[in-house]
Amino acid sequence: MNRPKHPSSQSRRDFLKKSAALGAATFYPGYLSFGQTSPNELLNIAAIGIGSQGGKNIQSLMGTKLCRMAALCEIDLEGKHTQKSLTNHPDAKQYTDFRKMFDEMADQIDAVLVATPDHSHFCAAMLAMSLGKPVYVQKPLAHTFGQCQRLMDMAAKSGVVTQMGNQGHSGGNFFQFEEWTKAGIIKDVTRITAYMNSKRRWHGWDTSLIEYPTDPMPNGINWDQWIDSAPEHPFSKRLHPGNWRSWFDYGCGAFGDWGPHILDTCHRFLKLGLPEKITPLTIEGHNSFFFPQASTIQFDFPEREGMPACAVTWYDGQDNQPPEQEKYIDVPIDPSEVEPEAGSESESSEVRKSKPGKIIYSKEHIFKGGSHSDTLKILPEEKYMEMRKDLPRFGSIKGGHFMNFVQAVKGEAKPQSPFEISAPLTQVFNLGCIVQRLNEEIRFDRKTNSITNNSTAQALLDPPPREGWEEFYQL
């Protein structure tokens, strides 16, 4: 189907070419390049995605007392899930297309929040950075391996502040892992078990599905904009507003959703990089459309920088508990202690068999950790009590991850999870999602960033965009 290009796409390309010709010095945060604010004034924020998680993020940004909402961009301005943000910020200009928003008011925007479904992070973030706008993007950073690489490259080219929304990277988990690694307490890690066994939206769906479902489209939805650069499918309640994470074409499943909150510090401080091999040990309910009912995936990372090879095994699915459950994992647990899936229809009645987390095995110690900012414990408890008085102290960032981002935009701090850190982390999840989709082992060449044993998997690393969205891949 031939689609007309966005009416301002040509003028935008002309602007970007002129900017590129001026060199990297062209790219600055909005308050420097356009003179709209100073570091002592409120930042003008444009939010792309304002319901569910986006609404929570807007509240967090406003909680810093250093921001104002200048623009709200949402494909469903009449949806129930978006009304709170619209009511709370009546003076913000409203859009359903982020391209039009930037065309009309780029010079009034100091920083951008992207909190849309996984498949639509990329284009909005690329355009924002190309226009010199600092950007906060929800996790996982992007839907595909290639998108992550382009985001990382654009962040380096533009020089703008970037941050991915894995909040634990500004909390105790980050600083403890950093200090314990420096002190040699965490070292020689050879194995990690990570798990997320709560009910997900797609659990119980019919795995014999042969085509995407379809429902009548509610009023007020810009569905073509929702599809973004991804493959096109009809509107369905099983896609919008909350079920998109279930589908291979649009989401990253439980792994992409929770991996950034569980494995981020392991990946960073153990310098894992990208794996050499990813093996599906268990895939239950495999189908071609949505994520499995349960999966166990092993990632093999080679020796690197004096550290031993490390195997990371991921478990998801309600009944797919890791073998460590009986010995190390806390069960049962109060559901209120764990963040439910955003917008979950059953979040008040979810029964949780274990709290999402990880067990880290080194040659000397075993560590148990949770997700987000949860700190590690040394196992067994008796050993931890013996070591406790000699363990390094650590802190966290006052005001958390959003304050860190705002302060970084103002030039007062460095972002905790910039794209140079969060893009390679997300690429691990991208690879895992390919294995869940194909139910086949893949071998990955870390030097060439390519899958060497499976042409279908290789194509999924960087699939082409939908017609009409190519410009964002060419920035």
Image (cartoon, rainbow, N blue to C red):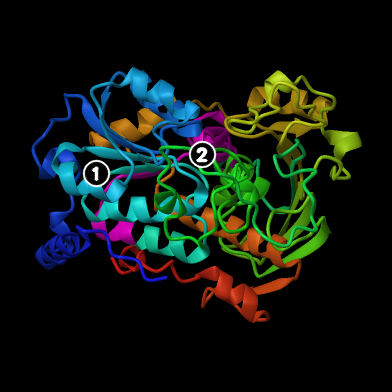
Element class at badge 1: helix
Q: How many marks?
A: 2
Element class at badge 2: loop
| Residue 309 visible (yes or no) | no
Residue 275 is drawn in which quadrant? bottom right
User: Of the residues shown, which amino acid type is indicated by label 2?
Assistant: Asn
Residue under label 1:
101
Residue 225 located left or right of residue 191: left
| Badge nearest the viewer, 1 or 2 | 1
User: Of the residues shown, which amino acid type is indicated by label 1?
Assistant: Met
Residue under label 2:
166
The boundaries of the magenta stretch are 154-181
- In the image, residue 62 sits, relative to residue 456, either above or below, namely above
Q: Residue at x 33, y 56 (%)?
A: 126
Tell me, yes or no, whether the two marked residues, 1 and 2, touch with CB atoms within 8 Å.
no
Image coordinates of residue 435 in percent, x first then y, are 70, 64
Residue 158 located left or right of residue 342: left
Nearer to us in this view, 217 or 469: 217
The answer to if 174 sits in the magenta stretch is yes
Q: Main secondary structure of the magenta part?
A: helix
Q: Residue at x 69, y 19 (%)?
A: 336
Indicate the quadrant containing the C terminus: top left, top right, bottom left or bottom right: bottom left
Image coordinates of residue 424 in percent, x first then y, are 50, 58
Nearer to us in this view, 368 or 389: 368
